[in-house]
């Protein structure tokens, strides 16, 4: 029988109550994964001694502050794990440096598949092309995912291996070509086609990737996440079982809409599973992305001759039918929508769905909601649809927005407007698109600025308190865990994070980013402890 007890003493214990953060005490005691007491350090230390509890004392860390552990409402656990293992071009600022990184990786040109992640041509003066990869790899197929995971950069060997070299299935918007053939840059549907025809990683490699992702997230103060990669539930389930007794992350795993009929026939529904692995929502896509200029927009993308982006669904009626089927069988809807027209039509589908679906069920979410029309902002609250957004995207998107639009889009990253309208807003990172760092996300949500720059659309800044809530209590509420996780009160699960100082008193983004994680506790066990 499990008998682990843990006390944290001489630490500011901050917990949300009725939407406000307050100091609940300066110590907390957990027994068998449940918070049993919050109070003074003397009282908790006395209880810990009598109950033979382990004690972590922060007396030597003045300012140390304990919060409910972070939850990332939207990341790609599988992709993030592989980004830690493969060629990673995140933050590389030129084509020349990208090619140097690829070469430094030392992958042999022996015919084996070479993968990589996170290149961003928005930072480069020269455009990527297959010929640059061909000069390095003639025999090995190379496919590198763009930072937004809506495009691939491929060499000729990969284009031929996937059948795209001579394909007439995709138009120039998805498979651009020059006089010699495909340029090697493929978007969205063509990317999906290619990925399905490239070698898949071995199970052992996937498990290593997932385990690495989990370990890093624990070090950043996360106890839970919503994983948007689908088709890997069996692997995640195997890993969750194999890691019993090891530091683990609580995972809510998305299911692709293509599997909706299958999971309904199996009698499954959202929330099924164990404390460390549950099925989450049905994942759908409404459009593409900002970086690839494939988000579905009301106005044409500048310089694209009338192109409004990608609409990834046949009709609003089709969406409505899928929404109804999912909700009828107990499934939450998690739908990717970035462009303002995509968000508008997705909200139309929610409005057209059955009343039980479209009002009052905050488990249903729009993922990203990056661009919104003014009239659509209040519809989130009116329809009971939450906004699952990623403030860290502003790190790179501030520059993209400035160069793409002649004037700022008034509804871009409209966090304040959504909250003011009564919508539930949860924060995530979209890792590996951005770093899965809650402190970075809180800083961008509250200040919307990069070093040395003025805030971007400062009217959309939220308070630090609201940002912290969006990384703790709100995402737990959206997966049905309100009252069980997201606060530090007796009876709730002991999922905690201790930071070096209280971010709620921060007046600059640098103060927030500097509040590094000292300790992460999941299920009443210390799963990460900083050495510094």
Image: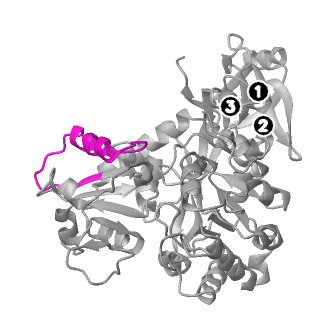
* CA distance separating discs 3 and 1: 23 Å
Asked whether the residues under the numbered discs 1 and 2 touch, taking CB atoms below 8 Å apart as contact, a structural biologist would say yes
Q: Is residue 78 left or right of residue 481?
A: left
The residue under the point 77% across, 39% down is 464
- Which of 78/458 is in front? 458
- Which of 158/386 is in front? 158
Residue identified by numbered label 3: 512
Q: Quadrant of residue 359?
A: bottom right
* CA distance separating discs 3 and 2: 21 Å
- Identify the mark nearer the N-term, 1 or 2: 1
Mark 3: secondary structure: helix
Q: Mark 3: give few (<14), some (14-19) or many (20+) Cα within 10 Å.
A: many
Closer to viewer: mark 3 or mark 1:
3
Q: Which mark is residue 488?
A: 2
The residue under the point 23% across, 37% down is 104
**Can residue 262 be seen in this snapshot?**
yes
């Amino acid at each position: 029988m499990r008998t682990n007890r843990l006390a944290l003493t001489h630490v500011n214990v901050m917990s949300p109550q009725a939407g406000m953060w307050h100091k609940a005490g300066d110590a907390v005691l957990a027994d068998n994964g449940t918070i049993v007491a919050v109070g003074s350090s003397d009282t908790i230390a006395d209880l810990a001694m009598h109950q033979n509890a382990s004690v972590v004392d922060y007396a030597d860390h003045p300012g140390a502050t304990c919060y409910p552990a972070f939850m990332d409402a939207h990341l790609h656990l599988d992709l993030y794990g592989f980004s830690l293992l493969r060629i990673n071009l995140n933050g590389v600022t030129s084509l020349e440096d990208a090619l140097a990184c690829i070469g430094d990786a030392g992958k042999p040109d022996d015919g084996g598949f070479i993968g990589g992640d996170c290149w961003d041509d928005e930072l480069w003066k020269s455009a990527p092309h297959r010929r640059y990869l061909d000069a390095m790899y003639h025999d090995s197929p190379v496919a590198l995912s763009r930072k937004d995971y809506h495009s691939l950069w491929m060499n000729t060997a990969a284009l031929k291996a996937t059948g795209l070299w001579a394909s007439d299935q995709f138009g120039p918007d998805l498979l651009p070509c020059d006089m010699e053939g495909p340029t090697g840059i493929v978007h969205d549907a063509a990317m999906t086609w290619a990925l399905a025809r490239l070698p898949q990683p071995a199970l052992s490699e996937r498990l290593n990737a997932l385990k690495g992702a989990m370990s890093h997230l624990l070090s950043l103060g996360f106890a839970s996440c919503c994983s948007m990669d689908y088709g890997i539930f069996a692997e995640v389930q195997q890993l969750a079982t194999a890691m019993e007794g090891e530091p683990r992350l609580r995972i809510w795993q998305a299911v692709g809409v293509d599997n909706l009929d299958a999971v309904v026939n199996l009698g499954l529904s959202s929330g099924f599973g164990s404390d460390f692995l549950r099925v989450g929502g049905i994942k759908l896509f409404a459009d593409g992305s900002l970086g690839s200029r494939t988000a579905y927009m009301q106005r044409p993308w500048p310089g694209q001759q009338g192109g409004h982006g990608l609409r990834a669904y046949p009709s609003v009626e089709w969406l409505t039918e899928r929404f109804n089927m999912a909700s009828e069988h107990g499934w939450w809807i998690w739908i990717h929508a970035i462009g303002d027209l995509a968000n508008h039509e997705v909200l139309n589908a929610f409005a057209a769905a059955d009343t039980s679906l479209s009002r009052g069920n905050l488990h249903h979410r729009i993922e990203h909601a990056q661009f919104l029309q003014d009239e659509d902002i209040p519809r989130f609250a009116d329809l009971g649809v939450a906004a699952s957004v990623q403030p860290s995207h502003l790190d790179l998107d501030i520059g993209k927005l400035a160069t793409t639009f002649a004037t700022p889009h008034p509804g871009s990253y409209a966090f304040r407007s959504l909250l003011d309208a009564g919508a539930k807003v949860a924060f995530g990172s979209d890792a590996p698109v951005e770093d899965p760092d809650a402190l970075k996300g809180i800083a961008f949500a509250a200040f919307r600025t990069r070093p040395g720059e003025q805030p971007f659309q400062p009217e959309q800044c939220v308070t630090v308190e609201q940002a912290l809530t969006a990384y703790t209590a709100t995402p737990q509420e959206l997966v049905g865990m309100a009252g069980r996780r997201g606060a530090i009160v007796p009876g709730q699960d002991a999922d905690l994070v201790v930071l070096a100082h209280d971010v709620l008193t921060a007046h600059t983004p640098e103060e927030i980013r500097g509040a590094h994680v000292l300790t992460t506790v999941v299920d009443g066990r210390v799963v990460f402890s900083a050495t510094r």
